Amino acid sequence: MAERNENVQADTLVEQEDQVDAVAPAAPVQQEEQPAAPQQQEEAPAAKPAKPRAAKSTAKKTRTVELTLTVTGTADGEWQADLVHGTKRVVQGLVISAAAVSKAAKELHEDIAGGIDEVIEAARAQHRTRMEELEAELAKVKAALAELSD
C-alpha cells in the first residue's frame, strides 16, 4: 500500500513539474519530498501568467445587418411574407402572389427556385382539378336550367 502512495505522489510531482514548465519554462524545478497538497499551495501564485494584451486591430470592421425574410405558402397557393430586422418585426403576414415568389426564388438561386416551383406546381394541379370539378358542376346546372326553361 505504501508503494501505491509513492506512485500517486510521484505522479502528482510530475504533473506539477509539467505545469511549472508550461508556465515558466526557464524556472528551475524543485523536487522536494513533501506531500502534494502543501506544494500546490506554494506554487499556486506562480502558476498565474500575466495576460498579454491583444494588439488593437487597424482593420475597418464591417457592419452587418440582420434581416430575416420568411416566406410561407399553403397547398392552395397562398403566399405570405414576414420580415424581421434584428428583433423588430417590420412586416407580418404580407400577401404575395405565387408568381412574385417564383420570380424572387429564381433570382436568389436555382436550388431555391426548384423547391418553390414544385410547391407552386402542386398548387396549380390542385386548382386545375378543382376548376374541372366546378366546370362539370356548372355544365350540370346549365343542363338542368335548360330543361326547366323548355
Image: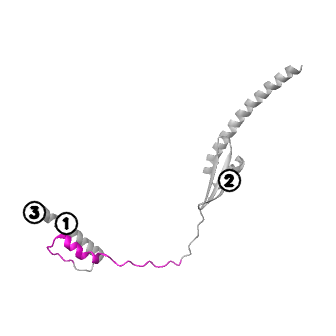
Residue in front for this viewpoint, 65 or 108: 65
Select label 2 or label 1 by which is in front.
1
Q: Earlier in the sequence, mark 3 or mark 2?
A: 3
Question: Which residue does the image show at 67% across and 49% down from the upper left?
Answer: 80
Asked if residue 23 can be seen in this view, the reply is yes
Quadrant containing the N terminus is bottom left
The residue wearing badge 1 is 11
Identified by mark 1, the residue type is Asp
Local SS, label 1: helix
Q: Nearer the viewer, residue 129 or 80?
A: 80
Give yes or no for contact between labels 3 and 2 (Cβ–Cβ under 8 Å).
no
Q: Which secondary structure is most common in the magenta stretch?
A: loop
First-in-chain label (1 vs 3): 3
Colour scheme: one colour
Query: Residue 134: x percent and y percent?
Result: 75, 31
The residue positioned 68% from the left and 53% from the top of the image is 104
Amino acid found under the numbered disc labelled 2 = Ala
User: Badge 3 is on which residue?
Assistant: 2
Residue under pointer 2? 104
* Badge 3 amino acid: Ala
Q: How many marks?
A: 3
Q: Quick one: label 2 or label 1, which is nearer the N terminus? A: 1
Q: Which residues are magenta?
A: 29-58
The residue at 86%/22% (across/down) is 146
Foreground mark, 3 or 2?
3
Q: Are marks 2 and 1 in contact (CB under 8 Å)?
A: no
144 lies left or right of 21: right
- Where's residue 119, x and y in %? 64, 43
